[in-house]
Image (tube, rainbow, N blue to C red):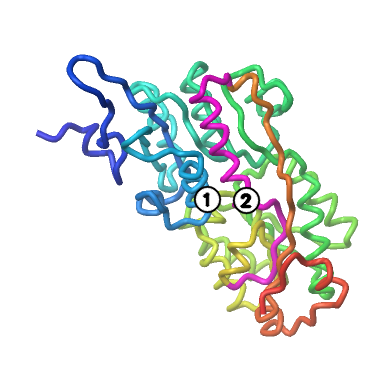
Amino acid sequence: MITRRAAIQFAGGALLGATFGAGSETRRLPRLGWVANTLPVMGMSGLDPADPLMRAFAHGLRDLGFVEGRNIVIERRSAEGRPERLPGIMRELVALPVDVIFTIGPAAIAAHQATETIPIVVIYGGDVVQERLASSLGRPDRNITGLTDVSDTIHGKRLQLLGEAAPKISRVGVIAYHPPRAAWRVATESAARALKLNVVWIGVNAPQEYSTAFATIVREGANAIYPTDTTINYVHRRTIIDFAAKQRLPAVYIERAFVDDGGLMSYGPDFIDMYRRAATFVKKILDGSKPSDLPIEQPKKFELLINARTAARLGLPISQNLRLRADEVIQ
């Protein structure tokens, strides 16, 4: 009979050799709990995940010498767009137990609530100190470490760049979680006022809410959009990009995957680099380091990308000044 626990493993997971050795002397392989918020299971499966960010983390593990089933066991889980599932997922991983948990965004809070002893490596798009996940970036003093972007000024920078690319915009639909994080809202509205832009806040917490969100953007007369740094916006980026194209709305996005998929422009950390770097935290912890002693790192590189084809379709001439500042202009 297949047990419930066995049934929920997927793509290798813990079913690949939990121990190795001969006779009664066996050595348990380290277990990594890998949890996503909204990525579907198939997006995480296999040694080479389809999603570019998850693939960057997987390649980071590989480059550090980890081979699934040989010297590490990976327990993959996804809330699949249902954040209420995260506490149960984390409790399950704690009960196995795993030796370290890797997760992103709000799932870090669920992980921390589930355990104060198992090390947690995060990529967190907010202030980990303000959220009480760590005492400080330099010395977390708790069981959480990893990478974070604590600067909310990036929202203003993105609006500024959007205004440079599309000078005639006046009303921006900001797609965020509902309610948006307070610091995000304050920084975004402050920057918008300085740029003489009006902001319409659009809340999206689940995929089925995009149709209502798009209707609100049209009804409110927004003539540009800014999908903020939420996991759900990243996962459903093509839905957002298709809407922007249909409505001929200039948009600024959080990272290059949006531009590669046809979005107008993006400005943000090099997330591929951040996900690769997250793997080094996993290795350090499995080698014996305590997360409390590993400083939480910030992005080392920010990049501006522009899709010239999309700009042409929107009738937006990209200035020479903006082109020169871009890290890449996709023709």
Callout 1 crowding tier (Cα within 10 Å): few <14, some 14–19, many ≥20 = many
The residue at 43%/30% (across/down) is 87
- Image quadrant for the N terminus? top left
Q: Is residue 153 covered in magenta?
A: no
State the image quarter where residue 308 is shown: bottom right
- Secondary element under disc 1, as helix, strand or loop, is helix
Residue 322 relative to residue 127: left or right = right
Q: Considering depth in this image, is 39 or 306 the residue closer to the camera?
A: 306
Residue 28 relative to residue 241: left or right = left
Callout 2 crowding tier (Cα within 10 Å): few <14, some 14–19, many ≥20 = many
The residue at 62%/45% (across/down) is 274
Residue at the spot of label 1: 56
Q: Which residues are magenta?
A: 262-290
Tell me which numbered mark, 1 or 2, is placed earlier along the sequence.
Answer: 1
Three-letter code for the amino acid on which mark 2 is drawn: Phe
Q: Is residue 181 above or below residue 251?
A: above
Q: Residue furthest left?
A: 1
Residue 118 in view (yes/no): yes
Three-letter code for the amino acid on which mark 1 is drawn: Ala
Distance of label 1 from label 2 (alpha carbons): 9 Å
Q: Considering depth in this image, is 1 or 300 the residue closer to the camera?
A: 300
Q: Is residue 208 above or below residue 125?
A: below
Q: Circles 1 and 2: CB distance less than 8 Å?
A: yes
Q: Is residue 227 above or below residue 134?
A: below
Residue at the spot of label 2: 271
State the image quarter where residue 262 is shown: bottom right
Residue 221 in view (yes/no): no
Q: Residue furthest right?
A: 194
- Image quadrant for the C terminus? bottom right
- Secondary element under disc 2, as helix, strand or loop, is helix
The residue at 79%/74% (across/down) is 166
Q: Considering depth in this image, is 85 or 93 the residue closer to the camera?
A: 93
